[in-house]
Image: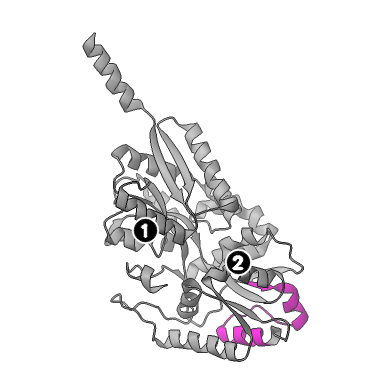
Amino acid sequence: MRKLFVLVFFFGAALAQVEVPFWHAMDGPAGRQIEAFAQAFNAEQAEFRVVPRYVGDYREAETRLIAALRTGTQPVLYQAEIAFFPRLVAEGRAVPLDGRLGLDRETVEDFYPAVWAYGVMNGRRYGLPFNTSTPVLFFNASAFRTKGVKAPRDWAAFEAAAKRLSDRRRKGYIAVLESWTFEAMVTSRGGSLVTEDGRPNFDSKEAVEALAMLHRMARSRTLIPRRLAEAQFALLDFVRTKGMMVFASIANWPAAEDYSFAFDLGVAPVPREPGGKVPMGGAQLVVLKGASERQVAGAVAFWKFLMRPENIARWVEASYYVPVRKSALPHLEAFYAENPYRKAAFEQLAYAVPRPRVPEFVVWRV
C-alpha cells in the first residue's frame, strides 16, 4: 500500500500543471491581446499555465528585472527589448534554446531573415522573435496637401518639408530626443553608431551629418525639441497641430488612435539615402536562467502558439507591429487594404538591420 501511495504521489507531481510567469512591457490593446493569448493557450492544453504580468515600459521592465535577478525572483519568460537583449546574453542570464524548438526547415525559412537572425548571438540561439517594428514618419497629411508637400524620401527633402510646413504657430518637425530615432537618422545615411569591433561611433560622418541637420533645424526654428521623458507631450504637440511630423514606432499608432485628430493621419517610411538602412525595434522573448526544464518547455510551447500564422495576424491587428512570418500575410490582407499606411513599417523590413548587439550599447544609448 505504501509503495502504491508513493507511486501515485510521484505520478501526480509529474502531471501537475507547470506555471510559466511571463513579464512583458505591453499595455493598451497589445497588452490585452497578450492576456487573451495566455488564456487561449492555457485553455487548449493542461500541462502549462502561462501567467502574464505587465511590468511597465521597456525601461521600467529592465529596472524591475535587474532587481528580480538579484533576489532570484525573475520570471521564466521575459520580453527583452532588443537593445537590452545582448546584455542578458553577455551576463549569462538567458537560457540557450538550440535543439529545444523542434522547427522544421520550412518553418524556419518562413520567418523573415533579419527577424529570425537577431535571436542568435555567438552562434547560439537565445532569443525568440515576437514583436518587431521599424520606425516610421507620422505626418499631418492634411497640412501636406495644403502646402503641396510630399512625404520626404531623403533627408534633404525632409529638411525642406519641415521648413515649408513651419510658421509662427507651428513647426514642421517634433524632435523626440531618444536613441532609436537618432540611430535611424544615422543608419538611413549608411552609417552605424557602433564600429565593427564594438566601439562607440558617435563621431562618424553619418552621425555628424545627422547632428548638423538637427542643429540647422533648431536654429531655423523648424522643430520642437522634446526629451524622451516628454514623449507624451510630443504626441499632444502632433495631435494639436503644433508639429507636422514626428518619428515613432509603428506600434505607437494604436495609442494615437485614442485621440481625436482634426486632420488626416499619414505614415511614411524613414527618409533614406542610397544604401541606407533602418534599425529594427521591438523585443525578443528570452527564457531566463533559473527556469526548470519543464518551465523551459512551457515557455517554448507558448512561443510556438504565438507564432501560429493566425495568431501573428491577431497580434499585428492589435499592436500594429509587423508580421514576423510570411505565412501570416494572407491573414492580414483586409487589415492592410483598409488603410495602406499600415504597411509602411512592414515594407521597410527589406532593408532593416538589427540594432547594435553590443552589451554596452544599452548604456551608451542613454
- Above or below 59: residue 186: below
Q: Residue furthest top?
A: 1
Counting every numbered tag in the picture gives 2
Position of 26 with respect to 72 (left or right) is right
Which residue has dot 2 on it? Answer: 232
Work out whether residue 132 or residue 236 is closer to the camera in this orientation and state it: 236
Q: Give percent across and percent down for residue 5.
A: 27, 14
Picture quarter with the C terminus: bottom left
Q: Which residues are magenta?
A: 138-163
Q: Dot 1 lies on which element?
A: loop
Question: How would you rate the neighbour count of disc 2 (Cα within 10 Å): few for under 14, some for 14-19, many for 20 or more?
Answer: few
Q: Give percent across and percent down for residue 295.
A: 34, 40
Q: Quadrant of residue 122?
A: bottom left
Residue 359: tell me if it is visible.
yes
Q: Give percent across and percent down for residue 210.
A: 49, 85
Q: Residue furthest left?
A: 3
- Above or below 270: residue 211: below
Residue appearing at x 46%, y 66% in the figure: 280
Q: Earlier in the sequence, mark 2 or mark 1?
A: 1
Query: Residue 119: which numbered mark, if any?
Result: 1
Residue type, label 2: Gln
